[in-house]
Amino acid sequence: QVQLVESGGGLVQAGGSLRLSCAASGRSFSNYNMGWFRQAPGKEREFVAVISWNGGRTKYEDSVKGRFTISRDNAKNTVFLQMSSLKPEDTAVYYCAADFSTGVFRVTIHEYDYWGQGTQVTVSS
């Protein structure tokens, strides 16, 4: 079992920055990949970024490349999403998720094993 708790969401103006955190507890954090997803109103949940179990590899959805950075601190059982140059279209509930596979990165929601409750990010124009 893994419990995930996101924090750091809020309201920010376009062009601003936010840093999301996801604290994990339960099964050893350094044994699995971690992803971030988001869901805008009326839309399906979509992949944002993923980081390998040791932080050595990352992958991003095209629209966030160069603006978002995923990182993790295994000593603190926490994964982060640094978001910069935010746009109104980034407005969504952001979720972190745990993937017990440590191989090929997964980008679909059905492949992840545990989810947090989400944190709202609102970007005003």
Image (cartoon, rainbow, N blue to C red):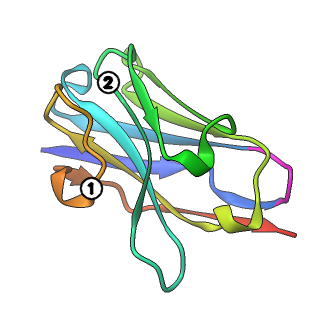
Q: Quadrant of residue 116?
A: bottom left
Between 115 and 88, the one lying in front of the other is 88
Give the image quarter of residue 92. bottom right
Mark 1 lies on a secondary structure that is: loop
The foreground one among 7 and 12 is 12
Q: Residue at x 54, y 46 (%)?
A: 62
Magenta-colored span: 13-17
Nearer to us in this view, 69 or 116:
69
Tell me if residue 14 is in the magenta stretch. Answer: yes
Whether residue 113 sits left or right of residue 40 in the image: it is: left
Does residue 110 sit above or below 74 in this rendering?
A: below
Residue at x 26%, y 47% (from the top left corner): 3
Going by the numbered disc 2, the residue's amino acid type is Ser
How many badges with numbers are in the image?
A: 2
Name the residue tied to disc 2.
52
Considering only order in the chain, which callout, 2 or 1, is on the residue closer to the N terminus? Answer: 2
| CA distance for labels 1 and 2 | 15 Å
Residue 37: percent from left, percent from top: 42, 55
Identify the residue position indicated by label 1 in the image.
108
Look at label 1 and name its amino acid: Thr
7 vs 105: above or below: below
Left/right of residue 95 with respect to residue 109 in the rendered view: right
> Which secondary structure is most common in the magenta stretch?
loop
